[in-house]
Image (cartoon, rainbow, N blue to C red):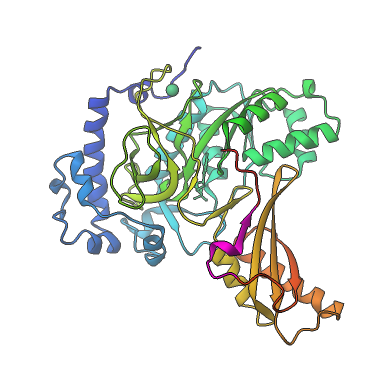
Amino acid sequence: MNYQYWNEQFEKMPRRDLEAWQLEKLRETAGFALRTPFYKERLAGTGIGEPGDIKTLEDLKRIPFTTKEDLRRGFPYGFLSISRDEVIRLHASSGTTGAPTTIYFSREDLARWTGFVARCIYSTGCNKTDVFQNMITYGLFTGGLGFHAGGEAVGMLVIPSGPGNTTRQFRLMQDFGTTVVHATPSFLLHVEARMREEGINRDRIRLKRAFAGAEPYSEDTRRRIEELLRIDVYNSYGLSEMNGPGVAFECQAKNGLHIWEDGYIAEIINPDTLEPVKDGETGELVLTILCREATPILRYRTRDLSAFYTGPCPCGRTHRRLRRITGRTDDMLIINGVNVFPSQIEEAIMAIKEAGNNYLIVVEKEGVLDKLTVKTEVGPDIFMDDARPLNALRERIRKTIQASITVNPRVELHEPGSLPVSEGKALRVQDKRPKDL
Ligand code: AMP
Ligand code: ZN
């Protein structure tokens, strides 16, 4: 294998130097954090009142964890550490309408982020001769613009196609000779199925690789996409709280995702005891960002489950690897790559007074894509045999839910008292998708 490095000095940095770099960056980041209203309060009493109070990397453990709840409470500017005038971009977590978790970037922050994404792309063997079709959502979601900038930095011809409309995607692929795409794994399977249905000749498409992420998928799914489309598929992991893509990525050895330790400090903890787990053991990934001044976030509990692979990687990179993410510790659903909390659906239903109190959320596979159905009872004043107002109500509920979560659900209305009454929250969610992770 001919490995290529975007930034060889950092990618192959001896662990000792890497840790020294981390310590320096952690101090810097703590300095930024101490300027934010949130961390000023959170760090009071921890003995960390200035960057110099961090003497070793072990001192990180004196910093309390930060959760998604904290980020929500800090909205809009509680985590901002620089002047608003120096901020040139914001992004937000997918499936939300902007309010709960917003991340700000300075010009330098964007440049650093782009560098990490370019590193990921380049590590798969891409170069300026490639044509890159970015089939993922642009907008507040970080996947679109993040990969777009990374692709341009590598010098590829970037086609900002966004997702959807497979007929148009095939036309672009054929017209411009697309060699690499970025999409969710479920959309890649969908693309393959549509390709067969539309009778597109694979030999007329020059596709060689895909970056697939934003949702969990198994090794089997990867292999299936690789065989069906005759391409190499690389797992891409990121989250908006940590910039977005460019946090961890598979190299050509395809055995775990290198977490870029010059940009992040990764810990894996037992979510109950909050103590670190041993290497190789599954736990919750906790991340500290070292490459962003505008929105420093320390020890963020990602809720994502993973494990460390610490042995050397044949590619020569010294950064530890994460096992592919196998699930989450909370109730967040990922529907075609979009994060959805059941509470968001509940709020949308409850905002409509004609809707009843009982509901059921069903997620299943329809073909290769995820399909969300929301079953809800109607209120006692609604007659189930009057079709017109019922259809109008169904449509209103559908639109309200879609406006909240951005995913378009199928809505079913049921008579009062006809859905099973559930006491626990989880019972209101039926995730019928095959679990093959
Ligand atoms: P967002 O902040 O909208 O980018 O969503 C981030 C979340 O998407 C992560 O915390 C993960 O739960 C999920 N995610 C992103 N990439 C992957 C991946 N490659 N494998 C599994 N889950 C992923
Ligand atoms: Zn490697």
Q: Nearer the viewer, residue 284 or 119?
A: 284
* Magenta-colored stretch includes residue 424: yes
The answer to whether residue 216 is visible is yes
Residue in view at x 73 percent, y 31 percent: 173
Residue 321's spot in the image, x, y percent?
40, 30
Residue in view at x 50 percent, y 54 percent: 93
Q: Is residue 166 left or right of residue 40?
A: right
Above or below: residue 134 compared with residue 332: above
Residue 107's spot in the image, x, y percent?
40, 46
Magenta region: 422-431
Q: Nearer the viewer, residue 329 or 248?
A: 329
Above or below: residue 63 compared with residue 136: below
Above or below: residue 209 compared with residue 213: above
Above or below: residue 342 compared with residue 189: below
The answer to whether residue 177 is visible is no
Which quarter of the image is occupied by the C terminus?
Answer: top right
